[in-house]
């Protein structure tokens, strides 16, 4: 019976139909329990119901980590009383094809709208000279291949990001109410674009891994993401996300933060370009390998100067990547 003696609220119905464990799992995966058929007594949603619901696609979208549950709940509560989360209905024209959203698309849309609504996004963009990285990669690629690992630019970038986050912990953080959580662990989410949606597997404790370890983890997680063989744990507890549209030729982008994280890095395409270089004190035109990096950050907890210092350190490490670290 409702605590207020009146009509049962949505929250009371939710709690009646689920246990704390079920609600926790649902919050971690950004699921609306009311959409899950319950097989328990009186339609109660059980743990097996949620796990079964996730079976076909638990790893198909980037989940909201546990710390985001209060934020997600608040966003859902406010949206119920405010404007709809998505666009109004539009009538199709003759000849148009209507494609209803899949559950994955609905969850992704909800998460993106919520992130824009919750976090004041600011972007800072740096150009990076990858010539040093390109040279190291060319020398080490065969050696890595013998170990079954494809050495990509992304591995170097992830390594530099992990080092930068250790030096700038406020970028590796999350908002909780009116507090900032400085994450101890540095867990890098690596966005993988697939035909059926987007997935963000997580490289755990990336700052403790060598370049080889990071490259191997990215290869492994990416391959298993494409074959839908990731476990739910492997898409949880990310503290910072890297997205790489540069593989499609994009020069740069301004991505949406993966809540409740404080920032996300966008990697632009990396290519050879003419550039002014100094040789023996004289300027000349040379060929350099260059590309853009864009950081979107939550301005509530990361100031512009903090973001720029972080990016400057990442850039410096990439441009002077030590031979010993490769």
Image (tube, rainbow, N blue to C red):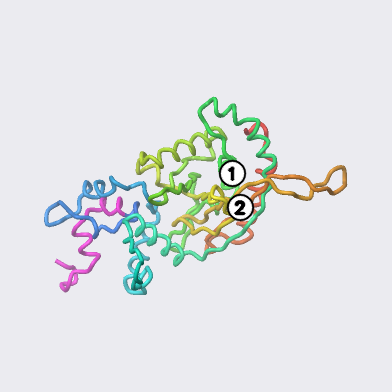
Residue 182 highlighted magenta (yes or no): no
x and y, in percent, of residue 7 in the image? 17, 72
Identify which residue, 180 or 251, lies in the foreground.
251
290 vs 202, nearest the viewer: 290
Left or right: where does residue 260 sit relative to residue 325?
A: left
Horizontal placement of 110 versus 314: left or right? Answer: left
x then y, percent, for residue 51: 26, 46
For label 2, the crowd category at 10 Å Cα-Cα, with few meaning under 14, some 14 to 19 and many 20 or more, is many
Q: Are marks 1 and 2 in contact (CB under 8 Å)?
A: yes
- Residue at 15 percent across and 72 percent down: it is 5
Quadrant of res 77: bottom left
The answer to which of 166 and 104 lies nearer the viewer is 104
Report if residue 89 is visible in the image.
no
Earlier-in-chain disc, 1 versus 2: 1
- Within the magenta stretch, is there residue 17? yes
Give the residue at x 59% y 28%.
142
Up/down of 323 relative to 313, above or below? above
| SS type, badge 2 | strand
Q: Secondary structure at mark 1?
A: helix
The circle drawn on residue 47 is none
Q: Count neighbours of disc 1 (C-alpha within 10 A) and say few if under 14, some if 14 to 19, many if 20 or more.
A: many
**Residue 89, picture quadrant:** bottom left
Q: Residue furthest right?
A: 281
Q: Residue at x 25, y 51 (%)?
A: 22
Say which residue label 2 marks. 293
* Residue 104 position in % (x across, y down): 34, 54
Q: Which residues are magenta?
A: 1-26
Q: Which residue is mark 1?
A: 157
């Amino acid at each position: 019976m409702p605590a207020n003696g009146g009509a049962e609220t949505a929250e009371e119905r939710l709690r009646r139909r689920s246990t704390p464990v079920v609600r926790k799992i649902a919050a971690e995966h950004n699921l609306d329990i009311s959409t899950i058929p319950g097989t328990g007594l009186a339609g109660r949603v059980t743990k097996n119901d949620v796990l079964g619901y996730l079976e076909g696609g638990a790893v198909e979208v980037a989940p909201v980590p546990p710390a985001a549950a209060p934020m997600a709940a608040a966003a859902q509560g406010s949206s119920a009383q405010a404007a709809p989360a998505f666009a109004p209905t539009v009538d199709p024209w003759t000849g148009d094809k209507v494609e209803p959203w899949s559950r994955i698309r609905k969850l992704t849309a909800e998460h993106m709208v919520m992130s824009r609504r919750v976090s004041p996004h600011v972007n800072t963009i740096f150009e990076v000279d990858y010539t040093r990285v390109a040279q190291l990669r060319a020398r080490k690629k065969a050696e890595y291949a013998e170990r079954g690992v494809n050495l990509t630019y992304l591995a170097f970038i992830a390594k530099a990001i992990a080092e930068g986050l250790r030096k700038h912990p406020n970028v590796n953080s999350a908002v909780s109410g009116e507090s900032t959580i400085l994450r101890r662990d540095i867990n890098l989410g690596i966005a993988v674009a697939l035909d059926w949606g987007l997935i963000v597997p997580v490289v755990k404790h990336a700052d403790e891994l060598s370049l080889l370890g990071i490259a191997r983890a990215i290869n492994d997680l990416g391959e298993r993401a494409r074959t839908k063989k990731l476990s739910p744990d492997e898409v949880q507890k990310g503290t910072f996300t890297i997205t790489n549209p540069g593989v499609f030729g994009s020069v740069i982008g301004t991505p949406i933060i993966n809540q409740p994280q404080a920032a996300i890095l966008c990697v632009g395409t990396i290519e050879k370009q003419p550039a002014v270089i100094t040789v023996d004190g004289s300027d000349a035109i040379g060929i350099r390998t260059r590309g853009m990096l864009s950081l979107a950050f939550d301005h509530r907890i990361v100031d512009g100067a903090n973001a720029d210092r972080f990016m400057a350190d990442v850039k410096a490490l990439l441009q002077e990547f030590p031979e010993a670290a490769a």
